[in-house]
Image (cartoon, rainbow, N blue to C red):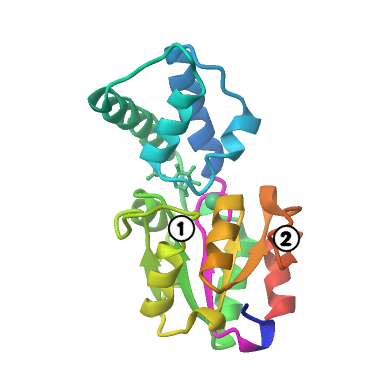
Amino acid sequence: MADIGDIKAIIFDLDGVLLSTDKYHYIAWKELADELGIPFCEKNNEMFRGVSRMDCMEMLVSKSATVVLTNKEKIAYAEKKNARYRSLLEEITPEFVEPEVRKTLEKLRMRGYRLAVGSSSKNSKFILKKTHLTDCFDSIVDGNDISRSKPDPEVFLKAAIALKAEPFQCAVIEDAEAGLSAAMSGGMLPIAIGEAKNSPLAKISLNTFGDLTEIF
Ligand code: BG6
Ligand code: MG
């Protein structure tokens, strides 16, 4: 597995790491679950972190013994969830990003690290643009670029290629078990923050985003 001394590139998850859009995902899934009559709480939502929209839809339906949907219906409900999520995203501005996040990304870049976003979300580029974060990264790989979502390492392996780094030269910053697991199986250094902080899969855990400047 990757070691701190080898790291040349850092790959960041988006939702719940760079900014707290994870709370909007929860609101949108919760509203859909209520509409379908499927019990859903914040604890259930933890399993949705890092997982693609359609995989989340499958997981939601599988929680119910009575709700049976055709593929077409699942796609339509997932689109409905996304429309609600996009409406919640309307309110985000550059101020939605903690100043500590922006400062840390700048410092890491000045120290010579190559930076990427590695997210399962198909809304990544929209969010990064709206919050003026796009230019903080050398590459952005997201849900539109992959065919297998986390815990598969595809998104991180593609980001590593884009950053011209070997997997062992990459650290991954994640708030999701699925993301830490993807980093591990990709041969990268899994670093946890937020909800994943106490995960046994994390090689390092951050109390705050700014802690990264003490590690790298
Ligand atoms: C991940 C989130 O970043 O993106 C998941 O942690 C979400 O909760 C996934 O399901 C897909 O997001 P989107 O924006 O493409 O629906
Ligand atoms: Mg996340």
What is the number of the mark on residue 34?
Answer: none
The quarter of the picture where residue 213 lies is bottom right
Q: Is residue 161 above or below residue 17?
A: below
Query: At x 73% / y 69%, what residue is drawn?
Result: 211
Which portion, as a residue range, is magenta?
6-20
Q: Is residue 135 above or below residue 37?
A: below
Task: Give percent across and percent down for residue 92.
Answer: 46, 44
Mostly what secondary structure, the magenta segment?
A: loop
Query: Which residue in the structure is indicated by mark 1?
Result: 152
Task: Give percent across and percent down for residue 38.
Answer: 50, 16
Query: At x 60% / y 31%, what residue is drawn?
Result: 44
Alpha-carbon neighbours of circle 2 within 10 Å: few (<14), some, or many (≥20)?
few
Specify whether 33 is left or right of 76: right
What amino acid type is highlighted by mark number 2?
A: Thr
Task: Give percent across and percent down for residue 185.
Answer: 54, 66
Q: Is residue 12 above or below residue 29?
A: below
What amino acid type is highlighted by mark number 1?
A: Asp
Residue 19 is a magenta residue: yes
Query: Which residue in the structure is indicated by mark 2?
Result: 208
Cβ–Cβ below 8 Å for labels 1 and 2? no
Specify whether 192 is left or right of 182: right
